[in-house]
Image (cartoon, helix red, strand yellow):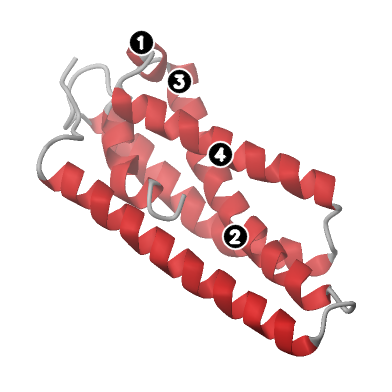
Amino acid sequence: QWSILPTIGEIGAEMCDAESCSGKSGRFVFRISLTLSQILVPLGSIISSLVTCPSFIFYILCLLQYLSCFVICAATAGVWRSLWTSEAGRALFISSYALCGMLEGYVITMAYRYIGDAESIPLVKRHSAGALLSIATVILVSSCAALLGAAVSDGHIACIDP
């Protein structure tokens, strides 16, 4: 989600505007979505530091993060455009963007916590697992961001006026 929301989130918010891709409503949706997301990412990380999450709840939260990301992608693609231009649709977009951000902070920090708290695994292997998670995350995020950024830059992903 790190590579998806920053790259296409603004386009999705523009698709929430019933008048045009450069309208006030779309700009407002993006400003609020981005602000809430940026506030909630570190908050999610802090919350995950308080107590260990049972694994079944962790998996549910991961699925919820994927669902919230799907909502942003659907809006960006113009799927159910009439929904996104309604008040309820804009609220759903903002909520999904913010939720995805909060869960981003929570899930990744909890993944590191699971690695660090696994006392049955030798410390060297836990360190290797944490390093691998870090490297894999950077490579995946950077690759997806580059591909999506190229698609946005080339105009393959863009807002279409209603």
| Mark drawn on residue 89 | 3
Tell me the amino acid under the disc marked 3. Gly
- Determine the secondary structure under disc 2: helix
First-in-chain label (1 vs 3):
1
Labels 1, 4: front one: 4
Measured in 3D between alpha carbons, the distance from the residue under mark 1 to the one under mark 4, in whole angstroms, is 22 Å
First-in-chain label (3 vs 4):
4
First-in-chain label (1 vs 2):
1
Residue plotted at (11% across, 37% down): 155
Q: Are marks 1 and 2 in contact (CB under 8 Å)?
A: no
Residue designated by label 2: 105
Tell me the amino acid under the disc marked 1. Ser
Q: Residues within 10 Å of mark 3 (few under 14, many from 20)?
A: some
Residue designated by label 1: 82
Depth check: 96 or 69 in front?
69
Residue plotted at (20% across, 18% down): 19
Tell me the amino acid under the disc marked 4. Tyr
Q: Position of residue 111 (x, y in %)?
A: 69, 64
Q: Position of residue 23 (x, y in %)?
A: 20, 29
- Determine the secondary structure under disc 4: helix
Q: Position of residue 158 (x, y in %)?
A: 18, 33
- Determine the secondary structure under disc 3: helix
Q: Position of residue 119 (x, y in %)?
A: 88, 79
First-in-chain label (4 vs 2):
4
Depth check: 144 or 89 in front?
144
Q: Residues within 10 Å of mark 4 (few under 14, many from 20)?
A: some
